[in-house]
Image (cartoon, helix red, strand yellow):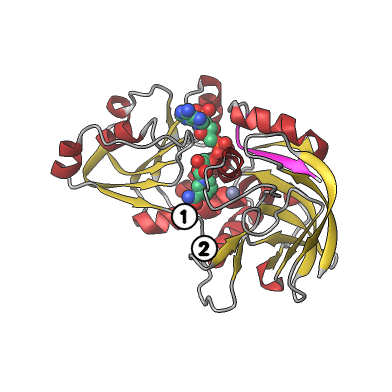
Amino acid sequence: MKYKVKAAVLPDFRSRFMIKEVELEAPDDWVLVDVKYVGICGRDVVVWKGGFKNLKPPLILGHEVFGYYKGTPVAVFPGVKSKECERTDLCEAFSVLGEQVPGGYANRVAVPEWNIIALKDHDLVKYAASACGVATFVHVAKILGIKEGDRVLVTGASGGVGIHGIQHLKLLGAEVYAFTRDKSKAKIIEKLGVNVVTDFDFYRSVGRMDHVIELVGARTLNESMRSLRFKGSIALVGNVTGEPIFIERPALFIMRELKMTGSAAYSKEEYIEALNEIEKGYIRPFYKLYNFYDINDAYEDVLSSMIIGRAILSI
Ligand SMILES: NC(=O)c1ccc[n+]([C@@H]2O[C@H](COP(=O)([O-])OP(=O)(O)OC[C@H]3O[C@@H](n4cnc5c(N)ncnc54)[C@H](OP(=O)(O)O)[C@@H]3O)[C@@H](O)[C@H]2O)c1
Ligand SMILES: [Zn+2]
């Protein structure tokens, strides 16, 4: 089917978005969702910078999509699966909304009906702020086997993924430590009942961790490794600067028998688990709302780490 959208189009990597009407095409059995709110994820910033080599502009970004379908408030699961794929996580056969498939920086998105998840209330902003972050942590917590009482450090804890993800860890009963560079953000994060550190040489102040969830990547990974106990584990979830990562002290990695894993997105079931936690009011949303037409201002703020939580576009 052919359909028209008003979209924020990225004409080139690292350039300004242009809002315009464009005609798009989707398989005939896909359906259209009216977008009300879309989050600007750190993953979108990676796309914006040209970090995913398989993508070519022009692009319509955005996978954190919330709106209405047939009058019902809905979330849109961002992984569009191919017909032959039985799995419901973001396996290699998936296309991602806002990447291989036109995304939600637009007034409408086309997806298979399978991707649409009905919500129980109309407070879409709280879902737009926190769903991707909580679901990312539901997934990584399972990979690491995080359980009640575990000591877990999260770097990049003030961003949209971190500040909502740490609340999921608290629900699991973990003892959470958070790293942010910003002292004023630290004061806000502390109110969630976590211990916050702001200096890059944080390993002495946090003590020995069972797990580290790395949202920052290159800039903090070596200090995070120093913070791990014998047989501790670290999950690389993000690498905000996109730099290569070097292990400064391989002997420490070897002698402590540390484990390192990647963690990529989440399954539809994990996404629904996150939506349920949000719906029940267990997750406090942190966000800043922007008018759709102010998308370039929103990007400037995200790139300069001005925001605590998620920047959300109101369409
Ligand atoms: N693997 C997955 O499943 C998955 C899912 C979603 C996102 N991600 C990735 O996770 C990362 C975080 O995503 P997000 O949505 O939370 O991004 P975000 O909202 O933009 O927040 C990123 C945070 O990283 C910190 N940061 C930025 N530049 C830094 C630097 N040079 N040194 C140290 N800290 C820096 C900032 O914290 P302070 O200013 O407080 O220090 C900022 O709050 C991104 O790399 C994203 O691509 C991964
Ligand atoms: Zn996201």
Residue at 69 percent across and 49 percent down: it is 59
In the rendered structure, which amino acid carries the disc numbered 1?
Ala
The residue lying toward the viewer, choosing from 6 and 276, is 6
Asked whether, in this view, residue 62 is left or right of residue 32, the answer is left
The answer to whether residue 276 is visible is yes
For label 1, the residue is 264
- Ligand 1 is within 8 Å of the C-beta of the residue at disc 1: yes
Picture coordinates of residue 123, whole percent (x, y): 76, 51
- Crowding around mark 2 (Cα neighbors within 10 Å: few <14, some 14 to 19, many 20+) is some
Dot placed on the residue nearer the N-terminal end, 1 or 2: 2
Distance from Cα at disc 1 to Cα at disc 2: 7 Å
- Crowding around mark 1 (Cα neighbors within 10 Å: few <14, some 14 to 19, many 20+) is some
Asked whether, in this view, residue 57 is left or right of residue 147, the answer is right
Q: Which secondary structure, mark 2?
A: loop
Residue at 73 percent across and 29 percent down: it is 297
Picture coordinates of residue 146, whole percent (x, y): 36, 53
* Region rendered in magenta: 307-314
Picture coordinates of residue 209, whole percent (x, y): 29, 40
- Ligand 1 is within 8 Å of the C-beta of the residue at disc 2: no
For label 2, the residue is 90
